[in-house]
Image (tube, rainbow, N blue to C red):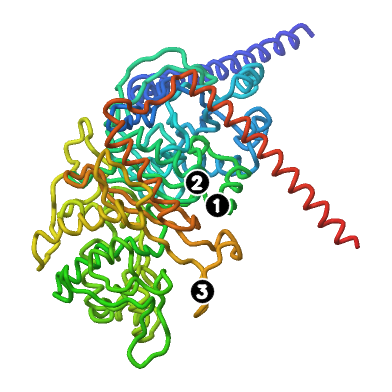
Amino acid sequence: MNKTLTSDTDQNTRIFMRRILIFGLLIFLGLSGLLLRYGYLQVYEHEKYKTQADNNRIKLISAPPSRGYIYDRNGILLADNQPVFTAMLSPDAVEDPERTLNLLAPIFELSDTDITDILARLNKSNNDPVTVKIDLTDEQLAQFSERQPFFRGVTIQSKLTRAYPYDELFAHVIGYVGRINDKETKRIDKSRYAGTDLIGKIGIEQHYEDILLGQPGYQSVETDAHGNILRQLETEPPIAGNDITLSLDYGLQTVAQQQLDGRRGAIVAIDPKTGDVLAFVSNPSYDPNPFISGISFKDYGALRDDIDQPLYNRALQGMYPPASTIKPFEGLGALHYGLRDWNTSIYDPGYFSLPGDSHRFRDWKRGGHGSVNLEKSIVMSVDTYYYKLAYEMGIQRLHDWMVRFGFGEKTGIDLPHEKSGIMPSPKWKEETYNKKWLPGETISVSIGQGYFLATPLQVANATAMTASKGQHITPHLLKSSDGAADVDIISKPDGKIEFDGNPSDWTRMHDAMEETIKRGTARRIYTPHYRIAGKTGTAQVKSIAQGKRYDKSAIDKRHWDHAWFNGFAPVEDPQIALAVLVENGGGGSAVAAPIGRALFDYWVLQRDTDPITPPSAEELKAIKRQKAFEKAERDALRDKEQALKEQQATADNIE
């Protein structure tokens, strides 16, 4: 029995030892494999995994450049950069961006549309941080800080953003910046826009985007596992955009807006010697600041649907019958073609009829002006004189002459989306309407009616050319730019009207326009302090039946005539030429001319001795607070009216 037990013990020992050896061999092989793998990773794959580790720990953050400042001709800052707190989301640090955004929505007041837009930008971001909300309020910052641990990958950064201190005063000329949309993303150089969501949308901001933008830099930072920045490692500073100085004058711009006094219209003033645009106003206007961070659908809808169209740039895009403002230019055409001289007179019975036609084209003065020469035709704005002149000249020659003053084509001003107006011709009508030109249409065009349409900018430009005796200078807003070497600013004549008359005819036309101020249709704005040359115009909006009188009281106000005035001063040494349009304002002599006089007074008499300057910072804040209060009242009234309409609609449906 003992022998059997000993044998079993030896066998068990051998089995145990064999198992120990096998297990030890497995451990040795496993450790050897680990050692070999460790060596492989440490030696052969060292650089690869070191780079990956650094990428998890070190991030490259784009540093957007400061956008170039915009100043007026006197150094007044018109477009500023201000630091604001901005919420940023890093896609590589957020597991469920949509859930995160939905949780952020009540804090940052994000709409469903906002969230959709942010998600779309995240999909195209290549893991670059995406802006969630610009210009956070103190309340939003406080609410986010309380919940920040729940929002991994969402950080608050201080960034510079655009600010327009004078709100609507320069909106239609400077424009604004806004978020880059999908269409813009496809055409821009993405490397230049690294770290920024903003791009010039309209106006000067869009036209000079390349100058204002600058070059981005970067920051290399170390982060923890939650994406929080621990320390800064390396920095390549951005290059700020170039500042630009505009030819606009703050004081004159202010006078122009004040003179329009809430009425729909436009004013453009130009220096005839340099082509500098001194004032550029379209009214009503709008506050461009909400567009920077993203205007609400409610507020944008109110602007878009406003019957007065505050977003519409009347000075640049508004096309109106230029009425009698064109008579000085047309009169010079009569001299050019040899159809009239200063002594040639016609008899005006108060109407004109084409040969063989009984239809009467009426003069504004019933009974007519009797004997009329060229000077009197300007001074008293005699329509019949130009009816007869245009009939003799013919539409083709009239067209060919008026295009020399820039009608029917863009002026080339440094603003996007300019309209060319219409200087009609037989070819134009054939191409547009597939119809032949009619003789009566020439008569309408002769007094700036019918198919003839022009922008206020075009009328101001033609007036500046007349003031400079035919010299053409492309009107421009840019006066200078620091550091932008490739900007071409034309400040000297770049063309001249080919005029076959006597050079003294320009001076005589100046004198005739001055007599218009002294004793003609614009005599109510005469001043003995300096010499003004001008021309009034009244553009018919609603046609009047043959033999009927224009009865303003019987016509809806939006069908009243447009009021025009154009002119320059001082006559002997023109410093300013302008065009004033008041939509549905009525008579040009009563409404538009006094506005022109106010601008002349400021530029000639007041500017050097008592210039209008911006309000102080405190005054500006008070003005903005008052405007915000008034806007809140308007919004409340609008919401109340909308609610009443909806209630009435519901009641009507029930009935």
In three-dimensional space, the C-alpha distance between marks 1 and 3, rounded to whole angstroms, equals 25 Å
Q: Place residue 365 in its image quadrant.
A: bottom left
Q: Secondary structure at mark 2?
A: loop
Estimate the x, y position of residue 598 in percent, counting from the top left. 37, 40
Q: Earlier in the sequence, mark 1 or mark 3?
A: 1
Q: What is the crowding at mark 3: few (fewer than 14 residues within 10 Å), some, or many (at least 20)? A: few
Q: Is residue 33 visible?
A: no
Q: Are marks 1 and 2 in contact (CB under 8 Å)?
A: yes
Three-letter residue code for mark 1: Asp
Nearer to us of marks 1 and 3 is: 3
Tell whether 117 sits left or right of 468: right
Point 60% across, 13% down: residue = 17
Estimate the x, y position of residue 418 in percent, counting from the top left. 35, 55
Residue occupying the far right of the picture: 655
The C terminus lies in quadrant: bottom right
Label disc, if present, on residue 284 of the rendered structure: 2
Label disc, if present, on residue 308 of the rendered structure: 1
Nearer to us of marks 3 and 2 is: 3
Estimate the x, y position of residue 416 in percent, counting from the top left. 34, 51
In three-dimensional space, the C-alpha distance between marks 3 and 2, rounded to whole angstroms, equals 29 Å
